[in-house]
Image (tube, helix red, strand yellow):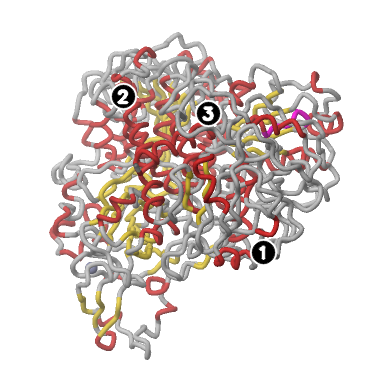
Amino acid sequence: MNVNQQPHMASPYGQPQSGYQGYQQTGYGNQHVPGGYPTPYAPYNGPASTYQPGPPQAPSSFAPSSAVHSQPLPPDSVAQTAPQPFYGAPPTPPQPFPGAAPPFSAAGPAQPPAPPLGSQQSFSQAHPPSQPQFTSAPPPVSTASYGGPPPTTQASHPRAPPLTSQPSTFSGGPPPTSSPSQYPQPMPQQPPVSQPNPFHSGPPQPTTAAGFPPQGGPPLRVPHPGVQGPPMTSQGPPTSQTNHVAPPQPGMLPGPPPVNMAGPPAQPSMQGYPPQQNGKYLYSSDIPPVQKTRHRIDPDAIPSPIQVIEDDKLNKGNEPFVTGVRGQVPPLVTTKFQVKDQGNASPRFIRCTAYNMPCTSDMAKQSQVPLAAVIKPLATLPLDENGPYIVDHGESGPIRCNRCKAYMCPYMQFIEGGRRFQCGFCSCVTEVPPHYFQHLDHTGKRVDCYDRPELSMGSYEFLATVDYCKNNKIPQPPAFIFLIDVSYNAVKNGMVAIVCQELKTLLDYLPRENPNVASNIRVGFVTYNKVLHFYNVKASLAQPQMMVVSDVADMFVPLLDGFLVNVAESRVVIESLLDQIPDMFADTRETETVFGPVIQAGLEALKAADCAGKLFVFHSSLPIAEAPGKLKNREDKKLVGTDKEKSLFQAQVSFYSNLAKECVAQGCCVDLFLFPNQYVDVATLGVVPTSTGGSIYKYTYFQGQADQERFLNDLRKDVQKQMGFDAVMRVRTSTGIRPTDFFGSFYMSNTTDVELAGLDCDKTVTVEFKHDDKLSEETGALMQCAVLYTSCSGQRRLRVHNMAVNCCTQLADLYRNCETDTIINYFAKYAYRGVLNNPTKNVRDSLINQCAQILACYRKNCASPSSAGQLILPECMKLLPVYLNCVLKSDILHPGADISLDDRAYLRQLVSAMDVAESHAFFYPRLLPVHKLNVEGNALPVAVRDSEERLSKGGVYLLETGLNLFLWVGANAQQELLQNIFGAPAFSQIDPNMTSLPILDNPYSKRLREIIESFRAQRSRYMKLMVVKQEDKLELIFKHFLVEDKNNSGGASYVDFLCHMHKEIRQLLS
Ligand SMILES: [Zn+2]
């Protein structure tokens, strides 16, 4: 019966040292219920004190207060049992998942092709001492490289030259106009390089982003503070020239004297891009941007996230990303692109921090670049990409390496005419089973290579045999159990009625593999306050029956048969139940709730049914009623900022982590929907969801009508999303590196197996790697992620993702092939876990220190010698400082006064399983100038940087964080624009309380609403829209997301933080 009696082939994770012989050590086997379940209804033999089972068919009372009654339902309830038509509109069809969202990438103007990656950009804060070096002529190589793509119409796109060129250091400031001869010849018509010209209407300047200097360009002289730059060629405002005598700023930089980096102030949404003028509704404003602060360094002279994002779209968004070449850095998550799997996993499944890993651990330590992969095993792919093929090897199961158990994949080398294969991970040679034998061609490749996904593709699935099933038994289809809080608060705020109403429709959309076949998932229902009510909804009943369990100390399921049912069979009874629940508890006075027993009840029900599944818990309050897992209110904001702050993120009792372990053993995933009016201790309530691959949703101060849209959209998506149950993930690597650390919503009972009671299409697991030996440049580094799971139809499968990256002996190669968005995703998860056990300040300091080391190592080993006053950043990490600052000033690491402890705990847990696209928007929100919308095309206006300086009073901006959507309306926005968006004739008549835009019959309104919908479709959670009028009190919330600015709680501005980083780097170098 037990899988562990099988030899090594029996277990997918049968690596000798792992301690994971089948499921033996993880509680799957006989640990909890020796010998399996002696009777299917074991819990019945348990505590009978409060439950006397009556005749199963006897109707039970719906009175929620007593133990068990056997009364007929009230007649009026009975009268409601006729099936009701679904409310409102026809059922929502299954929604497309994020990846399937329609494209909305901004198609920029034609662009010269990019030169190779890996050049560096530099600039300086230094000043006279370093001046002489800037007078030297540019190195010949870089001049040559400039002659490449002719600078056409774009300001920003002539990219840096190859790294082989001598990087020209740059100290900012307007270039010397007196030395035009230093400019490479192909750029005769250009205006001076680093002079952002915010108001130009002609061809934009061919500089790099927003005044960031081109690599390899001519040296630029540092102007003396206060000295005016050269005359400007544009009609820009002359005022800014005086800004450059920077006032002393309080804050972080005692470093070098301030030097202004460029000419005039930034202009919103220009950034070197021409406005989109071919649209009918171009609301360009002539009003200068809001400008409040003066900088010692012009923000336009430091690396711009928008520029990097736009460059990547232009350079990588036009051709499919083909995964056949090892070590290629994929397009950014902000670029829309198509993937062709030719042997490595798509970046939608795996993103790495570095695609060229250092060969030795010494090199890795020296650089401090984290080596990690963010893996989203069940990611939803866009419609134009094929999901992984399913491979069925029949009864013999997948072919694996004899030693390390890696699955057959393109990295296995067939030898001896195809009779054996050598493992790419451990080099062990394994016999090819006769049924799998195939001849090799003259290159040594199997002739059937391209007919077999496991030989030619990065991602595929194997059908698992019974050996891969718990207890060697084919699994039952999974079950969904809905557990609804019916205490006073939950009833009063409308949640109970909304959930019950929605479920009547939603149950038709349970996940299924074939859209033409009904879902196999069974469902069950529980309501609760201080006691639990189980419902018998067996198809043969005329009415649902309630069974009350009031002894919550030792939870059991009082229902043999009829608790978990097939929706189609029991539809009438289920609908009757869902109609009656809101009425039954409408007059409840019960305010107290339990929580632990609720999860226990769902868990016991799954155990009794011998299946995996998911619990949907709808909960409203701190569980203070006497019961296991009872909590007390420990909210104490005074601890914020002290050494005890970490306790706020920790669970207050150990009960839930023990419960989580049991849930994982059963494959019981828990999703928690919270509707709190006050502190509910998310840190503790979230333990089970975050250990079981579940999700937490939080609707603070939920008010039925106003908030149901967000909740219902989340619930629909959550119920319908593709997921796997009872999953185990293992990452194998080639010799030289090994996975050492894991981040995400899962449980680990040993050091190698990531156990996920549930794994949905939005969840990621982040894996960190460390060296345990040398890597080879020739073979690279390989990883294989295998996830064994039960599909929603009950099929046991193995999903395999393979990834190969390059290895290098030169640090420069590492720094040329990093992915900053993924590094930030890793750092955020690392830091957010760190606050559980360390003072927040220490976590912040160590993050800053690690990033300073990364950049200092580059400076020392890869950049050309130059003055210490210059900050030189690797091209592909030039946004590391700005993004790192966003992590540091996030609500977890640097809370403002107004964020609740629950919200911090919630966000901390949320980020732990986020993918790179969502973490990018979360830390650096997308800010779109929608007044520049072109209604005639699909292109979006180019986003602007997250700073108040970029907002124009005459504009309207859409800001998206992945969790929130804001529409900011400038006080001077044109009347026609307001009329088109809001149907309001004037700014003063816009209702700031609206949560959706009116449906107006004009192309602008239509296009804007389409964009909002497309943003929502791309995210795993529904984003509520908030309209923010300039100068309105809500603006404070909005400004919190302008992450390049200094914030209210003392978070540094981008400019200040960059100066601080520069200082840190200089200290490391000196
Ligand atoms: Zn092997």
* Residue 314 position by quadrant: bottom right
Residue bearing the label numbered 3: 500
Residue at x 17%, y 64% (from the top left corner): 8
* Residue 86 position by quadrant: top right
Where residue 393 appears, as percent x and y from the top left, is 33, 71
Residue bearing the label numbered 2: 646
Where residue 243 appears, as percent x and y from the top left, is 66, 30
Residue closest to the eye, 197 or 966: 197
Around disc 2, counting alpha carbons within 10 Å, would you say few (fewer than 14), some (14 to 19), or many (20 or more)?
A: some
Q: Is residue 543 above or below residue 152?
A: above
Kindly report which numbered mark, 1 or 3, lies closer to the viewer in this rendering: 1
Q: Which mark is residue 112?
A: 1
Residue at x 58%, y 19% (from the top left corner): 703
Q: Is mark 1 within 8 Å of ligand 1?
A: no
Identify which amino acid the numbered label 3 is placed on.
Cys
* Residue 414 position by quadrant: bottom left
953 within the magenta span: yes
Q: Classify mark 3: helix, strand or loop.
A: helix
Identify which amino acid the numbered label 1 is placed on.
Pro
Q: Tell me: 517 left or right of 524.
A: right
Kindly report which numbered mark, 2 or 3, lies closer to the viewer in this rendering: 2
437 within the magenta span: no
Residue at x 25%, y 76% (from the top left corner): 422
Q: Earlier in the sequence, mark 1 or mark 3?
A: 1
Residue 437 visible in the current orientation:
yes
Could you tell me which quadrant the C terminus lies in? top left
Q: Which mark is residue 917?
A: none
Asked if marks 1 and 3 touch (Cβ < 8 Å), the reply is no
Q: Which residues are magenta?
A: 950-954
